[in-house]
Amino acid sequence: MDFQKQHLSTSPSPLRFVLMLAFVAILAWWSSGCFKIDYYTHNDAFLTFSKDTLRFDTVFTDVGSATRSIRIRNPYDQFIRISRIALERGSASKFRINVDGISYPDGIAENVEIWPKDSIWVFVEVTINPDEPLSVSPFILDEDLQIETNGNQQKVVLEAWGQNANYIPNNQFKGKLAVLSCNLEQESWDDPRPYVLYGALFIDSCTLHLPPGTRIYVHGGIARNDLGIYNDGLIWTLAQGKIVSEGTVDEPVIIQGDRLEPEFAEIPGQWGGIRLGAGSKGNQFQYTTIKNSIVGIRADSASSLTLANVRIYNNANIGLLGERASIQASNSLFYNQGAQSVAFTYGGNYQFDYCTIASYGNTSDAVYMDNFRCLNDECSSVTIYRLIANWRNCIITGSGTDELNMVDATNGKEPFAWEVLFANCVVRVKDLLDDYPNFLSQCRDCVENKEYTDPLFVNIDMAQYQLDTLSIAQGKAKPLPGITGDIDDQPRDSAPDIGCYERQE
């Protein structure tokens, strides 16, 4: 059988030739600009995100990394160009971004395009060294991923835990409410690591016990829920809940904001504060510091509170607010508030012994007390509540000429509604005497702080409220049974000093 040699033809078939011409024509058309991409360029452009907050819930005990992702979607029927996707802190950020497979070490991606009705992925990585100082790696790393499109600014919040701590309730509760309940038993926060509160914590049917040395750092800020906008970072006891804080002079309990860097140490208003809800009984704080909140402690009606050797300061509003509450305080210091250091309203029952209440640098009184509630905006109609307030061995002073403000809505006509007594106190009053001309004669063995220059404290600018060598409060107190030491557990002598500090020679 003869075989003929077969050759592969190098000439294109008619169909292949047509396809090649079509491809070349399309390529030429595209490259010549005949095909135009239609971009959505209006300034109302808003992209949609799979999440508005990207949280890294890993608590690192050693150096480690974690990655999360977010999807950015173009909702329009046209192409869209994102001008920039950028980390708020740029190359200095602890976070790093990868946009659709491309990494951006400087933290900025520019001119990112998304096809119509399509989406892209942004991957975010964070590396944490929990042993770094708080100035480098704070408890909560909080940064914005900024997205700019057609001049519009959008953002995704990035959050990660920067230290090895107990995060309460957990990472999902920013701007949300959580309930701590233990069936009327006790939960003790006795871990040596600090506790970082994130969100609003309600204590119900439970006693929250804080043993010596407990540190609570509260992450605050503006939050929103269905009820509206409020300040986040709250500790709130309900009727069946209470707090028992049992610090010692060597190991006090600390409750403050979570920014511990030196530049934030004295900044007020970093978190919401502690609120003792109506009917919350048996709350106790001893050797405890509460600082840098909006209101230090607010005690609602029918709640009860005992303070011993407590410091409440650097709060944006009132330090201690009692609203028809029952409060006992001894050897405690209140100073540097945005409003009153101590305020009692709607009556209540209060006993203060050996306390120093100072109001320097603002226009509010150190102490305010009233016995009524307004029933309308004009306050032309009021409800009277009984006020019982006993002050013994206390300093009430500040930079104003009047640091004690009292409003008896009955104008003395109902003695049962106004039972206020002062004994062995240093008081700074002037205009108050117009409404209460017998105040100084009824203030038993009190010392009038007439002049701002009267020697009293060591150094108010340095918050040194120990008594000066020539202090007008020295030796003027009356010994009280059961109180033998001062705020620092230093012994008081037989002729004790007024205020929370006993001068030590």
Image (spheres, rainbow, N blue to C red):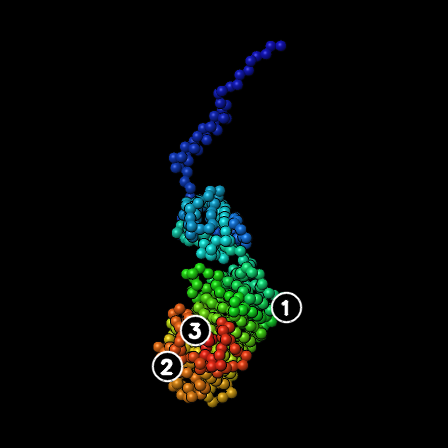
The image shows residue 452, relative to residue 185, as above or below, that is below
Farthest residue, direction front: 505
Q: Which of 18 and 178 is in front in this view?
A: 178
Q: How far apart are marks 3 and 1 (CA)?
A: 40 Å
Residue for badge 1: 185
Residue 13: horizontal and vertical position, in percent?
Answer: 50, 23
- From the image, state whether disc 2 or disc 3 is nearer to you: 3
Neighbourhood count class around disc 2 (C-alpha, 10 Å): few under 14, some 14–19, many 20 upward: some
Q: Which of 169 and 488 is in front in this view?
A: 488
Q: Is 20 left or right of 4, judged from the image as shown?
A: left
Residue for badge 2: 450
Which residue type carries mark 1? Glu
Residue 118: horizontal and vertical position, in percent?
Answer: 49, 45
Evaluate whether residue 183 shows in this view: yes
Which residue type carries mark 2? Lys
Pick whichever of labels 3 and 1 is earlier in the sequence.
1
Residue pictured at 52% horizontal, 81% vertical: 480
| Image quadrant where one finds the N terminus | top right
Which residue type carries mark 3? Gln
- From the image, state whether disc 3 or disc 1 is nearer to you: 3
Residue for badge 3: 466
Q: Distance between the residues labelled 2 and 3?
A: 19 Å
Residue 291: horizontal and vertical position, in percent?
Answer: 47, 67
**Local secondary structure at mark 1:** strand
Farthest residue, direction top: 1
The image shows residue 15, relative to residue 333, as above or below, that is above
